[in-house]
Amino acid sequence: MTYRLCLVGYGKIARDQHHPVIAEHARFELASVVSRSGVLVDVPVFETLGQALADGPEVDAVVLCTPPGPRVALAEQAIAAGKAVFLEKPPALTVSSAEALGALAFEAGITVFASWHSRFAPFVETARIWAEDRRIDEAQINWREDVLKWHPGQDWLWQPGGMGVFDPGINALSILTEILPVEVGVSEAILNVPKNRAMPIAADLVLSGPDLTGRAQFDFRETGDEVWDIRLTDARGETLTLSKGGAALQIGDGFVREAPEQEYRGLYDRFAQLLYDGVSEMDLRPLQLVADAFMVAERHSVAPFHDPSSVPR
Ligand code: NAP
């Protein structure tokens, strides 16, 4: 069976990943796109999801690649029309609206997939298996990238709900919650917020769990190569290091294994399975941890942030 998709929000991730992966996937077909900026693609383009659903080709599911702000309202619209929903991360602006969305989908018997692409990095499953029977004493996350390289012109990131540096940081938290055999929480946080912005450019979190201490450092001010590392230490002092966002793995001082990343292929395989089984997947723990960090955080005001490629709408 092939599932026909409507892709909503044709920005960086829709262009770089969703569209090419859908084009190559045997179980999916792109039927329409919703874009306010009138992109040129080889399927019909509509300005709103309402128009696409009313006047466009029949679809089975809607893939939401907008910023998180409009995501829940769009998902509700899709569910009301009987369409399954693939949510880019984060699934919603708030934990409560994501929970309400999950309940709505359940009542309607509609599949919703709250995707966490980093969980589909090549060595995440290996890390989960390594950790599953161990007592993990320590978890260290170091997640740094150049915001101007990875998020040029994305003003939404800096507005309330845009999450700032947690937009990539939540990827690390999605991996951590997947691989740890215990639940982890945020007990302290420092958020560095540029004087001219609402959201943090850097964050430093203290993590805690049963027998576990940890730290997560997120920073958008990296000017060299990105660093996307997670290191676990077990009770005997043995370590596992995931780097390159999960595309490289080192156990102890052993050799570093690397594999090509195919996260979005993995996401669409999972979505196809969920659609086939008629079930939903909505793990909100990464979003909850971000919300908790904002609740316990001390805020520090730091130098203003200017993005030369920002174009006012
Ligand atoms: P982006 O480049 O800013 O693209 C988002 C697109 O959504 C915009 O180009 C716009 O497309 C549409 N849009 C923006 N505001 C909207 C609104 N209020 N209502 C409806 N449509 C709106 O952002 P992105 O990097 O693709 O990120 C989108 C989502 O994917 C975010 O949640 C992000 O966390 C997630 N994500 C991003 C990456 C990445 O590497 N960039 C990786 C994984 C996940 P039109 O002008 O065509 O309407």
Image (cartoon, rainbow, N blue to C red):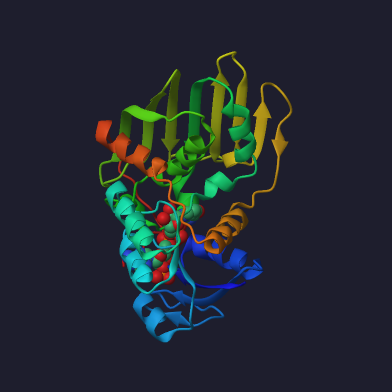
Up the image or down, 255 lies above or below 277; here it is above
Quadrant where the C terminus sits is bottom left
Give coordinates of residue 49: x percent, y percent: 37, 75
* Number of residue marks: 0
- Residue 100: x and y, percent? 30, 54
The answer to whether residue 297 is seen in the rendering is no
Left or right of 158 in this view: 152: right
Residue shown at 37% from the left, 34% from the top: 203
Vertical comparison of 134 with 123: above or below: above
Examine the rendered structure and indicate whether residue 111 appears above or below residue 131. Answer: below
Q: Is residue 169 visible?
A: yes
Residue farthest to the right, as pictured: 255
Q: Quadrant of residue 121?
A: top right
Residue 60 pos. (x, y %): 49, 73
Q: Quadrant of ligand 1?
A: bottom left
The residue at the point 55 percent across, 25 percent down is 232
Residue at the image point whose x is 61% and y is 58% from the top = 269
Residue found 43% across the figure and 46% down from its top:
283
Q: Residue furthest top?
A: 236
Residue 79: x percent and y percent? Answer: 37, 68
Task: Classify the position of the N terminus by image quarter.
Answer: bottom right
